[in-house]
Image (tube, grey):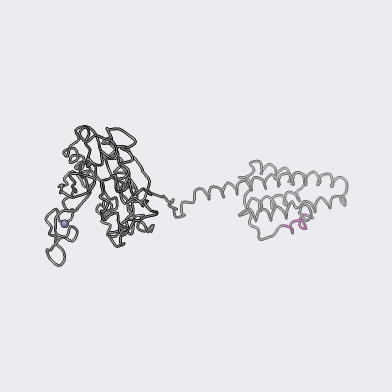
Amino acid sequence: MPDDLLKGIDRSWAAADPAALVPGHAARQAELEGLDPALAGLYARGAGVLAGAPDAAALHERTVALLGRERGVVTRALAGLPELPLEERKRRGRGLNLLKRWLEELERAKRAELERAAESREVLDVTLPGRRPWVGRAHVLAQVRDELLDLFHGLGYSVYTSPEVESEEYNFARLNFAPDHPARDAQDTYFVAPGVVLRTHTSPGWVRAMEERRPPLRLVFPGRVYRAEQVDASHMDQFHQLDGLCVDRDVSLADLKSTLNTFARSIYGAGVRTRLVPVYFPFVEPGAQLDVACAICDGSGRARSAAGEGRCPVCKGSGWSELLGAGMVHPNVLRAVGYDPEEVTGFAFGMGLERIAMARHGIPEIRLFLENDVRFLNQF
Ligand SMILES: [Zn+2]
């Protein structure tokens, strides 16, 4: 009968030593030898193929062949018991029950071993290439803005935001623009309704802040502004500004100059050379622009290229590049919000964030900022 039963176990199945899975294996084997040598052979072969199963599917197949309820080797052996003489039937019955229990135990131990191995392969397969997690970041303009806000925060300024859709009154009139100023023309400014514009600068925020608060004021006004520009490499019809405003007793042009120099050094380094050049803006008197010595030609206006020495292409030969506009707040602007220009004075400045980012990173094209191309954005 054992030979017949062994036919249920595929000859090609590889076996392994079950002793590592079940410490008492040798003793069990010996116990069956003493009880029923035929069953001892079946047990040795069955335990060997369970221990040698290479994976979970093979283990399942082998378990069904040995212990399956209908066609399993052990089931068939138990079914043959009634044909045996009484003494042999008792002996074999007891042996088969032991064999069945021990093979089941071995199957559980092997299954656990395969599961542990699969888990450790998942966790520890050091041969797989790494997957770099995708990390987002702030837009280059947001980086520049945050750096500037941090700088001005250190100088005692806080942030004030005002609407992007603004009345013509706040955008122009209260900032001392004459009624016939060309900026009020529809060619330069987006009108969304009669008397309502997309703000052309962040300066209306000064007026709103001064109406709400009494001096002293130290505020910065970051935000998006709109102008009806022809779009080209250096002009967009929307861009970002950061205005600053300081109003107090005895605020002078010297305070403005020292503030702007502190700012320029933080952007361009301690060795930067600056100059203030008189410029007209309606809302400041006197008005000025802050220039920095050209970073390419170091202020000489001349630069070497493959074609020899010639006019610097960045500053177009002037040796300077414009960084921002500034000035002392016009007395008319102070009067319009109910401040007394005899009592308080103020300075203000405004800069374009795109211009600063372009100068710092050598970005040649303003449209890149809004195109959302990650090949561009990932560089900063
Ligand atoms: Zn230059």
Residue situated furthest bottom in the rendering:
307
- Observer-nearest residue: 10 or 307? 307
148 relative to 38 in the view: left or right = left
Question: Is residue 273 at least partly visible in the picture?
Answer: no
Magenta highlight on residue 329: no
Whole-percent x and y of residue 222? 32, 45
Chief secondary structure of the magenta portion: helix
- Of 181 and 251, which appears nearest the observer? 181
Question: Horizontal placement of 138 versus 342: left or right?
Answer: right
Residue 207 visible in the shown view: yes
Q: Which residues are magenta?
A: 2-8
Is 353 on the left-hand or right-hand side of 133? Answer: left
Write down which quadrant ligand 1 falls in.
bottom left
Membership of 3 in magenta stretch: yes
x and y percentages locating residue 142 in the rendered image: 34, 48
Looking at the picture, tell me which residue is in the foreground, 362 or 33: 362
Residue 169 image point, x, y percent: 33, 47
